[in-house]
Image (spheres, helix red, strand yellow):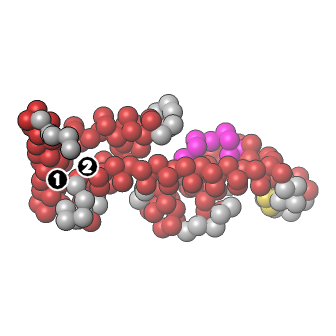
Amino acid sequence: MAQITPIDSAAEAREHQKRNDETALLVRVRDDGDRGAFEHLFELFAPRITNYVRSLGVESAGPDAITQDVMLAVWTKARLFDAEKASARTWIYTLARNRYIDIKRSKHREAKAFERLKYDPRTVVDKGDGPANYVDASSVAELLNDIPREQAEVIILAFVEGYSHREIAERLGISIGTTKSRVRLAFKKLRERMGVTI
């Protein structure tokens, strides 16, 4: 049986203490809304989460955006943390993994919706009476490609997938106000591109 050297024991003890310290910080956030403890957690975990998400294959600015979402969730969902079931580190990495999966699923749904729009010639958008007031599905997909992705995403989730504003907010991890604002901005831009003045 291999014997653990004192150096290994000391390293393990230091690592165990780090985890305990991280968990104590998260408990302070959970129980007291301690902003200082949250800032310390942010400093500790933001770079790690960014690297973790990047290792999952997220490119460009994606890892930073996901990290912001995850750390916001640490603050807003700290009440759900149970130190008896997991360390702060495990809990925060679980939040990151879940956020990554949510985004991946959302992009998959969005891609499928775009494909449906592009290749279903029966789909039309009715802008009023007369043949000049119909837009075919591929044109709608092109229009959606011309607006910011986060705005196109809420339009697809609401009007192609049929989700409510509340469901969209929960799925994307944003507020209902932000959801409504994105829908409103998207409609404004789509109307401009379609030449609709009302």
Which of 152/97 is in front? 97
Q: Which region is colored magenta?
A: 143-150
Which of the two discs, 1 and 2, labels the residue nearer the N terminus?
Answer: 1
Q: Which residue is label 2 attached to?
A: 89
Amino acid tagged 1: Thr
Q: Which residue is label 1 attached to?
A: 23
Residue 127 image offset from top left, x and y in percent:
78, 59
Which of 81/185 is in front? 81
- Answer left or right for 8 relative to 161: left
Based on the picture, tell me whether residue 147 belongs to the magenta stretch.
Answer: yes
Residue 12 image offset from top left, x and y in percent:
15, 41
Which of 146/160 is in front? 160
Give the residue at x 38% y 49%: 96
Q: Main secondary structure of the magenta part?
A: helix
In the depicted structure, whether residue 172 falls above or below residue 68: below
Residue 78 image offset from top left, x and y in percent:
24, 60
